[in-house]
Image: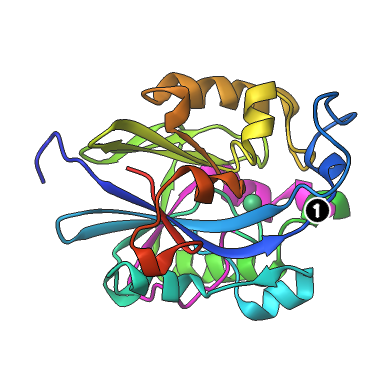
Amino acid sequence: MPADSQWEVYAIRYAHHPRPARENFLGPLPADIHEGVMPLDYFVWAVKTGDRAYVLDTGFDEAMARKRGREFLHSPGDGLRAIGIDPAQVADVVLSHMHYDHCGNHELLPNARYHVQDREMMFATGRHMCHSHMRMPFEEEDVVAMVRKLFRGRVVFHSGDEALAPGLSLHYVGGHSMGLQMLRVNTRRGWVMLAADAAHLYANLERGIPYPILYNAAEVIEGYRRAYALASSPEHVIPGHDPLVMERYPAASPELRGWVARLD
Ligand SMILES: [Zn+2]
């Protein structure tokens, strides 16, 4: 792989949730944001160069959508196949963190190694899970599935920022979850930052106001600064749950409109 590798970047939308605006901000609703519905979209992401692909997050499945009251649109696996990625051929998946909407579909990538931060596994299996409020965004079966992958030699741990491949690197943030990480990607338009839940919505990022589910608010806000600092421009930072991503970026192909956007 050449040292200056450029990657194609895809956002694959798989679920949707209409949510009151006030539930998207820590503290009072910002004065310029109207009361009412401010929905979330749910995504997995993929980056490709040549015949090499990395997947960021695995989403949830239809059963979890029912359990959590989310509107399920397409399975993440169908999204990968729609852009020519065979899930069985994927060698590496990065988990931004282990909340239920990012690490389900345990059997989707049967040959992939899972890249996680030390601190995320520690968080999901340690003392903080004694508290129901902290457990709420996690699913027991997701955490158990990761422990089983660990014992099958399929987990790669990272601590802080690390290079994965030419033009592709992980960046530790914490904040929303103790071991949250983002994925920085070199593309034909410069450095794109797939922020995942380091930034839920453009409105959180632009105002510096965290989404209310968090481990450490100061780290969330510092994460916004780091996402901007590591991207080629503010427009190169891609939030993890914003429906505007599907409006601001073109469909990967006409028949994938509303499903897969091209971010590079
Ligand atoms: Zn999320």
Q: Quadrant of residue 69?
A: bottom right
Percent position (x, y) of residue 254?
A: 36, 64
| Residue 56 visible within the image | no
Q: Could you tell me which residue is drawn at 80 percent across and 57 percent down?
A: 136
- Where residue 67 appears, as percent x and y from the top left, is 77, 75
Give the position of the C terminus as an image quadrant. Answer: top left
Q: Residue furthest left?
A: 2
111 magenta-colored: yes
Report whether residue 88 is seen. Answer: yes
User: Where, by quadrant of the figure, is residue 141 drawn?
Assistant: bottom right
Label 1: few (<14), some (14–19) or many (≥20) C-alpha neighbours in 10 Å? few
Place of residue 88 in the rendered image (x, y in percent of width and height, measured from the top left): 31, 76
Query: Which residue is at the far front?
Result: 254
**What residue do we see at 80% from left, 35% from top?**
25
SS at circle 1: loop
Answer left or right for 259 relative to 222.
left
Q: Is residue 189 left or right of residue 141?
A: left
| Residue drawn at 85 percent across, 23 percent down | 31
Residue 204: horizontal and vertical position, in percent?
A: 68, 31
Tell me: 173 left or right of 150.
right
Residues drawn in magenta:
102-130
Query: Residue 9 magenta-drawn?
Result: no
When asked about the image quadrant of residue 61, the answer is bottom right
The residue lying toward the viewer, choosing from 247 and 222, is 247
Reading the image, the residue beneath label 1 is 19
Residue type marked 1: Arg
Disc 1 within 8 angstroms of ligand 1 (CB):
no
Q: Identify the residue shown where x is 57% and y is 41%.
A: 180
